[in-house]
Amino acid sequence: MTKRVFNFSPGPAMLPLPVLEAAQKDLLALPGIGQSILEVSHRSKDFLSIIETAQANLRKLYGIPDNYRILFLQGGAQMQFAMIPMNFLRNSGKAADYIVTGSWSKKAAPEAKTQGDVNIAFDGSDTNFNRVPKADEMKLNPDAAYAYYCSTETIQGVQFPSEPDVGDVPLVCDASSDVLCRPVDMKKYAIYYACAQKNAGPAGVTMVIIRDDMVAKCPDDLPSMLRYPPLVEADSALNTPPVFAIYIVKLVTDWLLDEIGGLDKMLERNRMKSQMIYDAIDGSDGFYDCHAEKDSRSLMNIAFRLPSDELQDKFLAGATERDLVALKGHRSVGGCRASIYNAMPVEGCQLLAEYMTEFKKANG
């Protein structure tokens, strides 16, 4: 078997080894079908079975009620940045609330402003987005068209411990960095979406979970590909969907159900993995500085700095020698970042934590 490194990339990220092995085994021809998944028609009963299983798996994992549709779309999170305000802000006569806690929600808000009025209910830029807001810090409008937030900011490594309370306003969530990492009460959401390449599959597909009453609100004067009702009616196949990417999502959700045992078990594992690395940071006497405040720390993305650029470069070089790769942080935050999505093995987090402790002893 080809040697595999521990890939801490923020996305595209690691996939579970059993998923890769299953895809490799059946790539030439799916069992009983005689065609590769790369060749199967999106109109065929064989692919319909794949997409229906992926939807059923998501419903089981999240306990998604019957009055929600599950779509597999293209365009990534940034397409949703535009589609959501086009459908729910443009003709609403209201403003939308945006809770800005990092780079991705900061990008989403200007897209919404092209379609209508936006109220920035919270802006964490003064502290370089190192925390999520407390309830009394958010200036929410009880009559907003919707309230938008990003549950985990990949770049800054901050995560909402639970969804913000926005009252009766429809809640919209970009969960791209923490989808499927923990249980979620889907009944609290009007729209819950995530691009797959961080935690649920490869690049090329975005999962959108949308409540029926939101679908009914969509205007008629948008192109079909930018309106949710035609996409719902066509069950994600208004045009040719990303067949292979959806197939991998199906395999990932199979893995979560059959091998992990569901999202409660996944959360336990994710807490254990992240704690190893946070313990190495907190036990370093300030040698490592975590970007996120303690009550806002992410289970998925851990951003931290070393005392100098020189030590950072030395740290990254030593990590690569140990097969711990893609640890360099984003330029807006600097330092290092360990993205430890569901597929990152416990062993990878343990090795990184041990290396961090060793490096501090040698260079602190």
Image: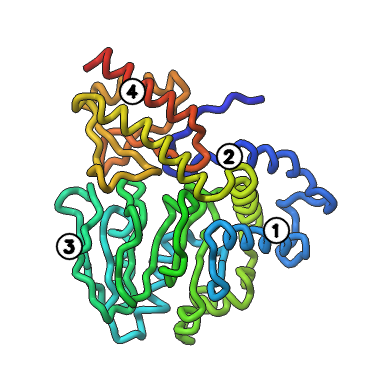
> Rounded to the nearest whole Å, what is the CA distance between mark 3 and mark 2?
39 Å
Give the residue drawn at x 43%, y 35%. 273
Mark 2 falls on what kind of element? loop
Q: Nearer the viewer, mark 3 or mark 2?
A: 3
Residue 289 picture location, percent across and down:
22, 33
The residue that disc 3 covers is 137
Residue carrying label 4: 356
The residue labelled by disc 2 is 16
Q: Looking at this view, name the residue that lies furthest to the top.
A: 362
Amino acid type at circle 2 is Pro
**Callout 2 crowding tier (Cα within 10 Å): few <14, some 14–19, many ≥20:** many
At label 4, the amino acid type is Met
Is residue 156 among what the camera can see?
Answer: no
C-alpha gap between disc 1 and disc 3: 44 Å
Residue at (20%, 60%) from the top-left corner? 123
Q: Give the mark, 1 or 2, whose residue is nearer the N terminus.
A: 2
Disc 1 target residue: 50
Amino acid found under the numbered disc labelled 3: Glu
Where does the image place residue 302, in percent across and percent down from the top left?
34, 39
The residue at the far left in this view is 126
Q: Is residue 333 left or right of residue 350?
A: left
Task: Look at the numbered disc 1 and give the secondary structure of its residue.
Answer: helix
- How far separated are the C-alphas under marks 4 and 3? 35 Å
Q: Of the two numbered discs 1 and 3 on the same chain, state the one appearing first in sequence.
A: 1
Dot 1 amino acid type: Ile
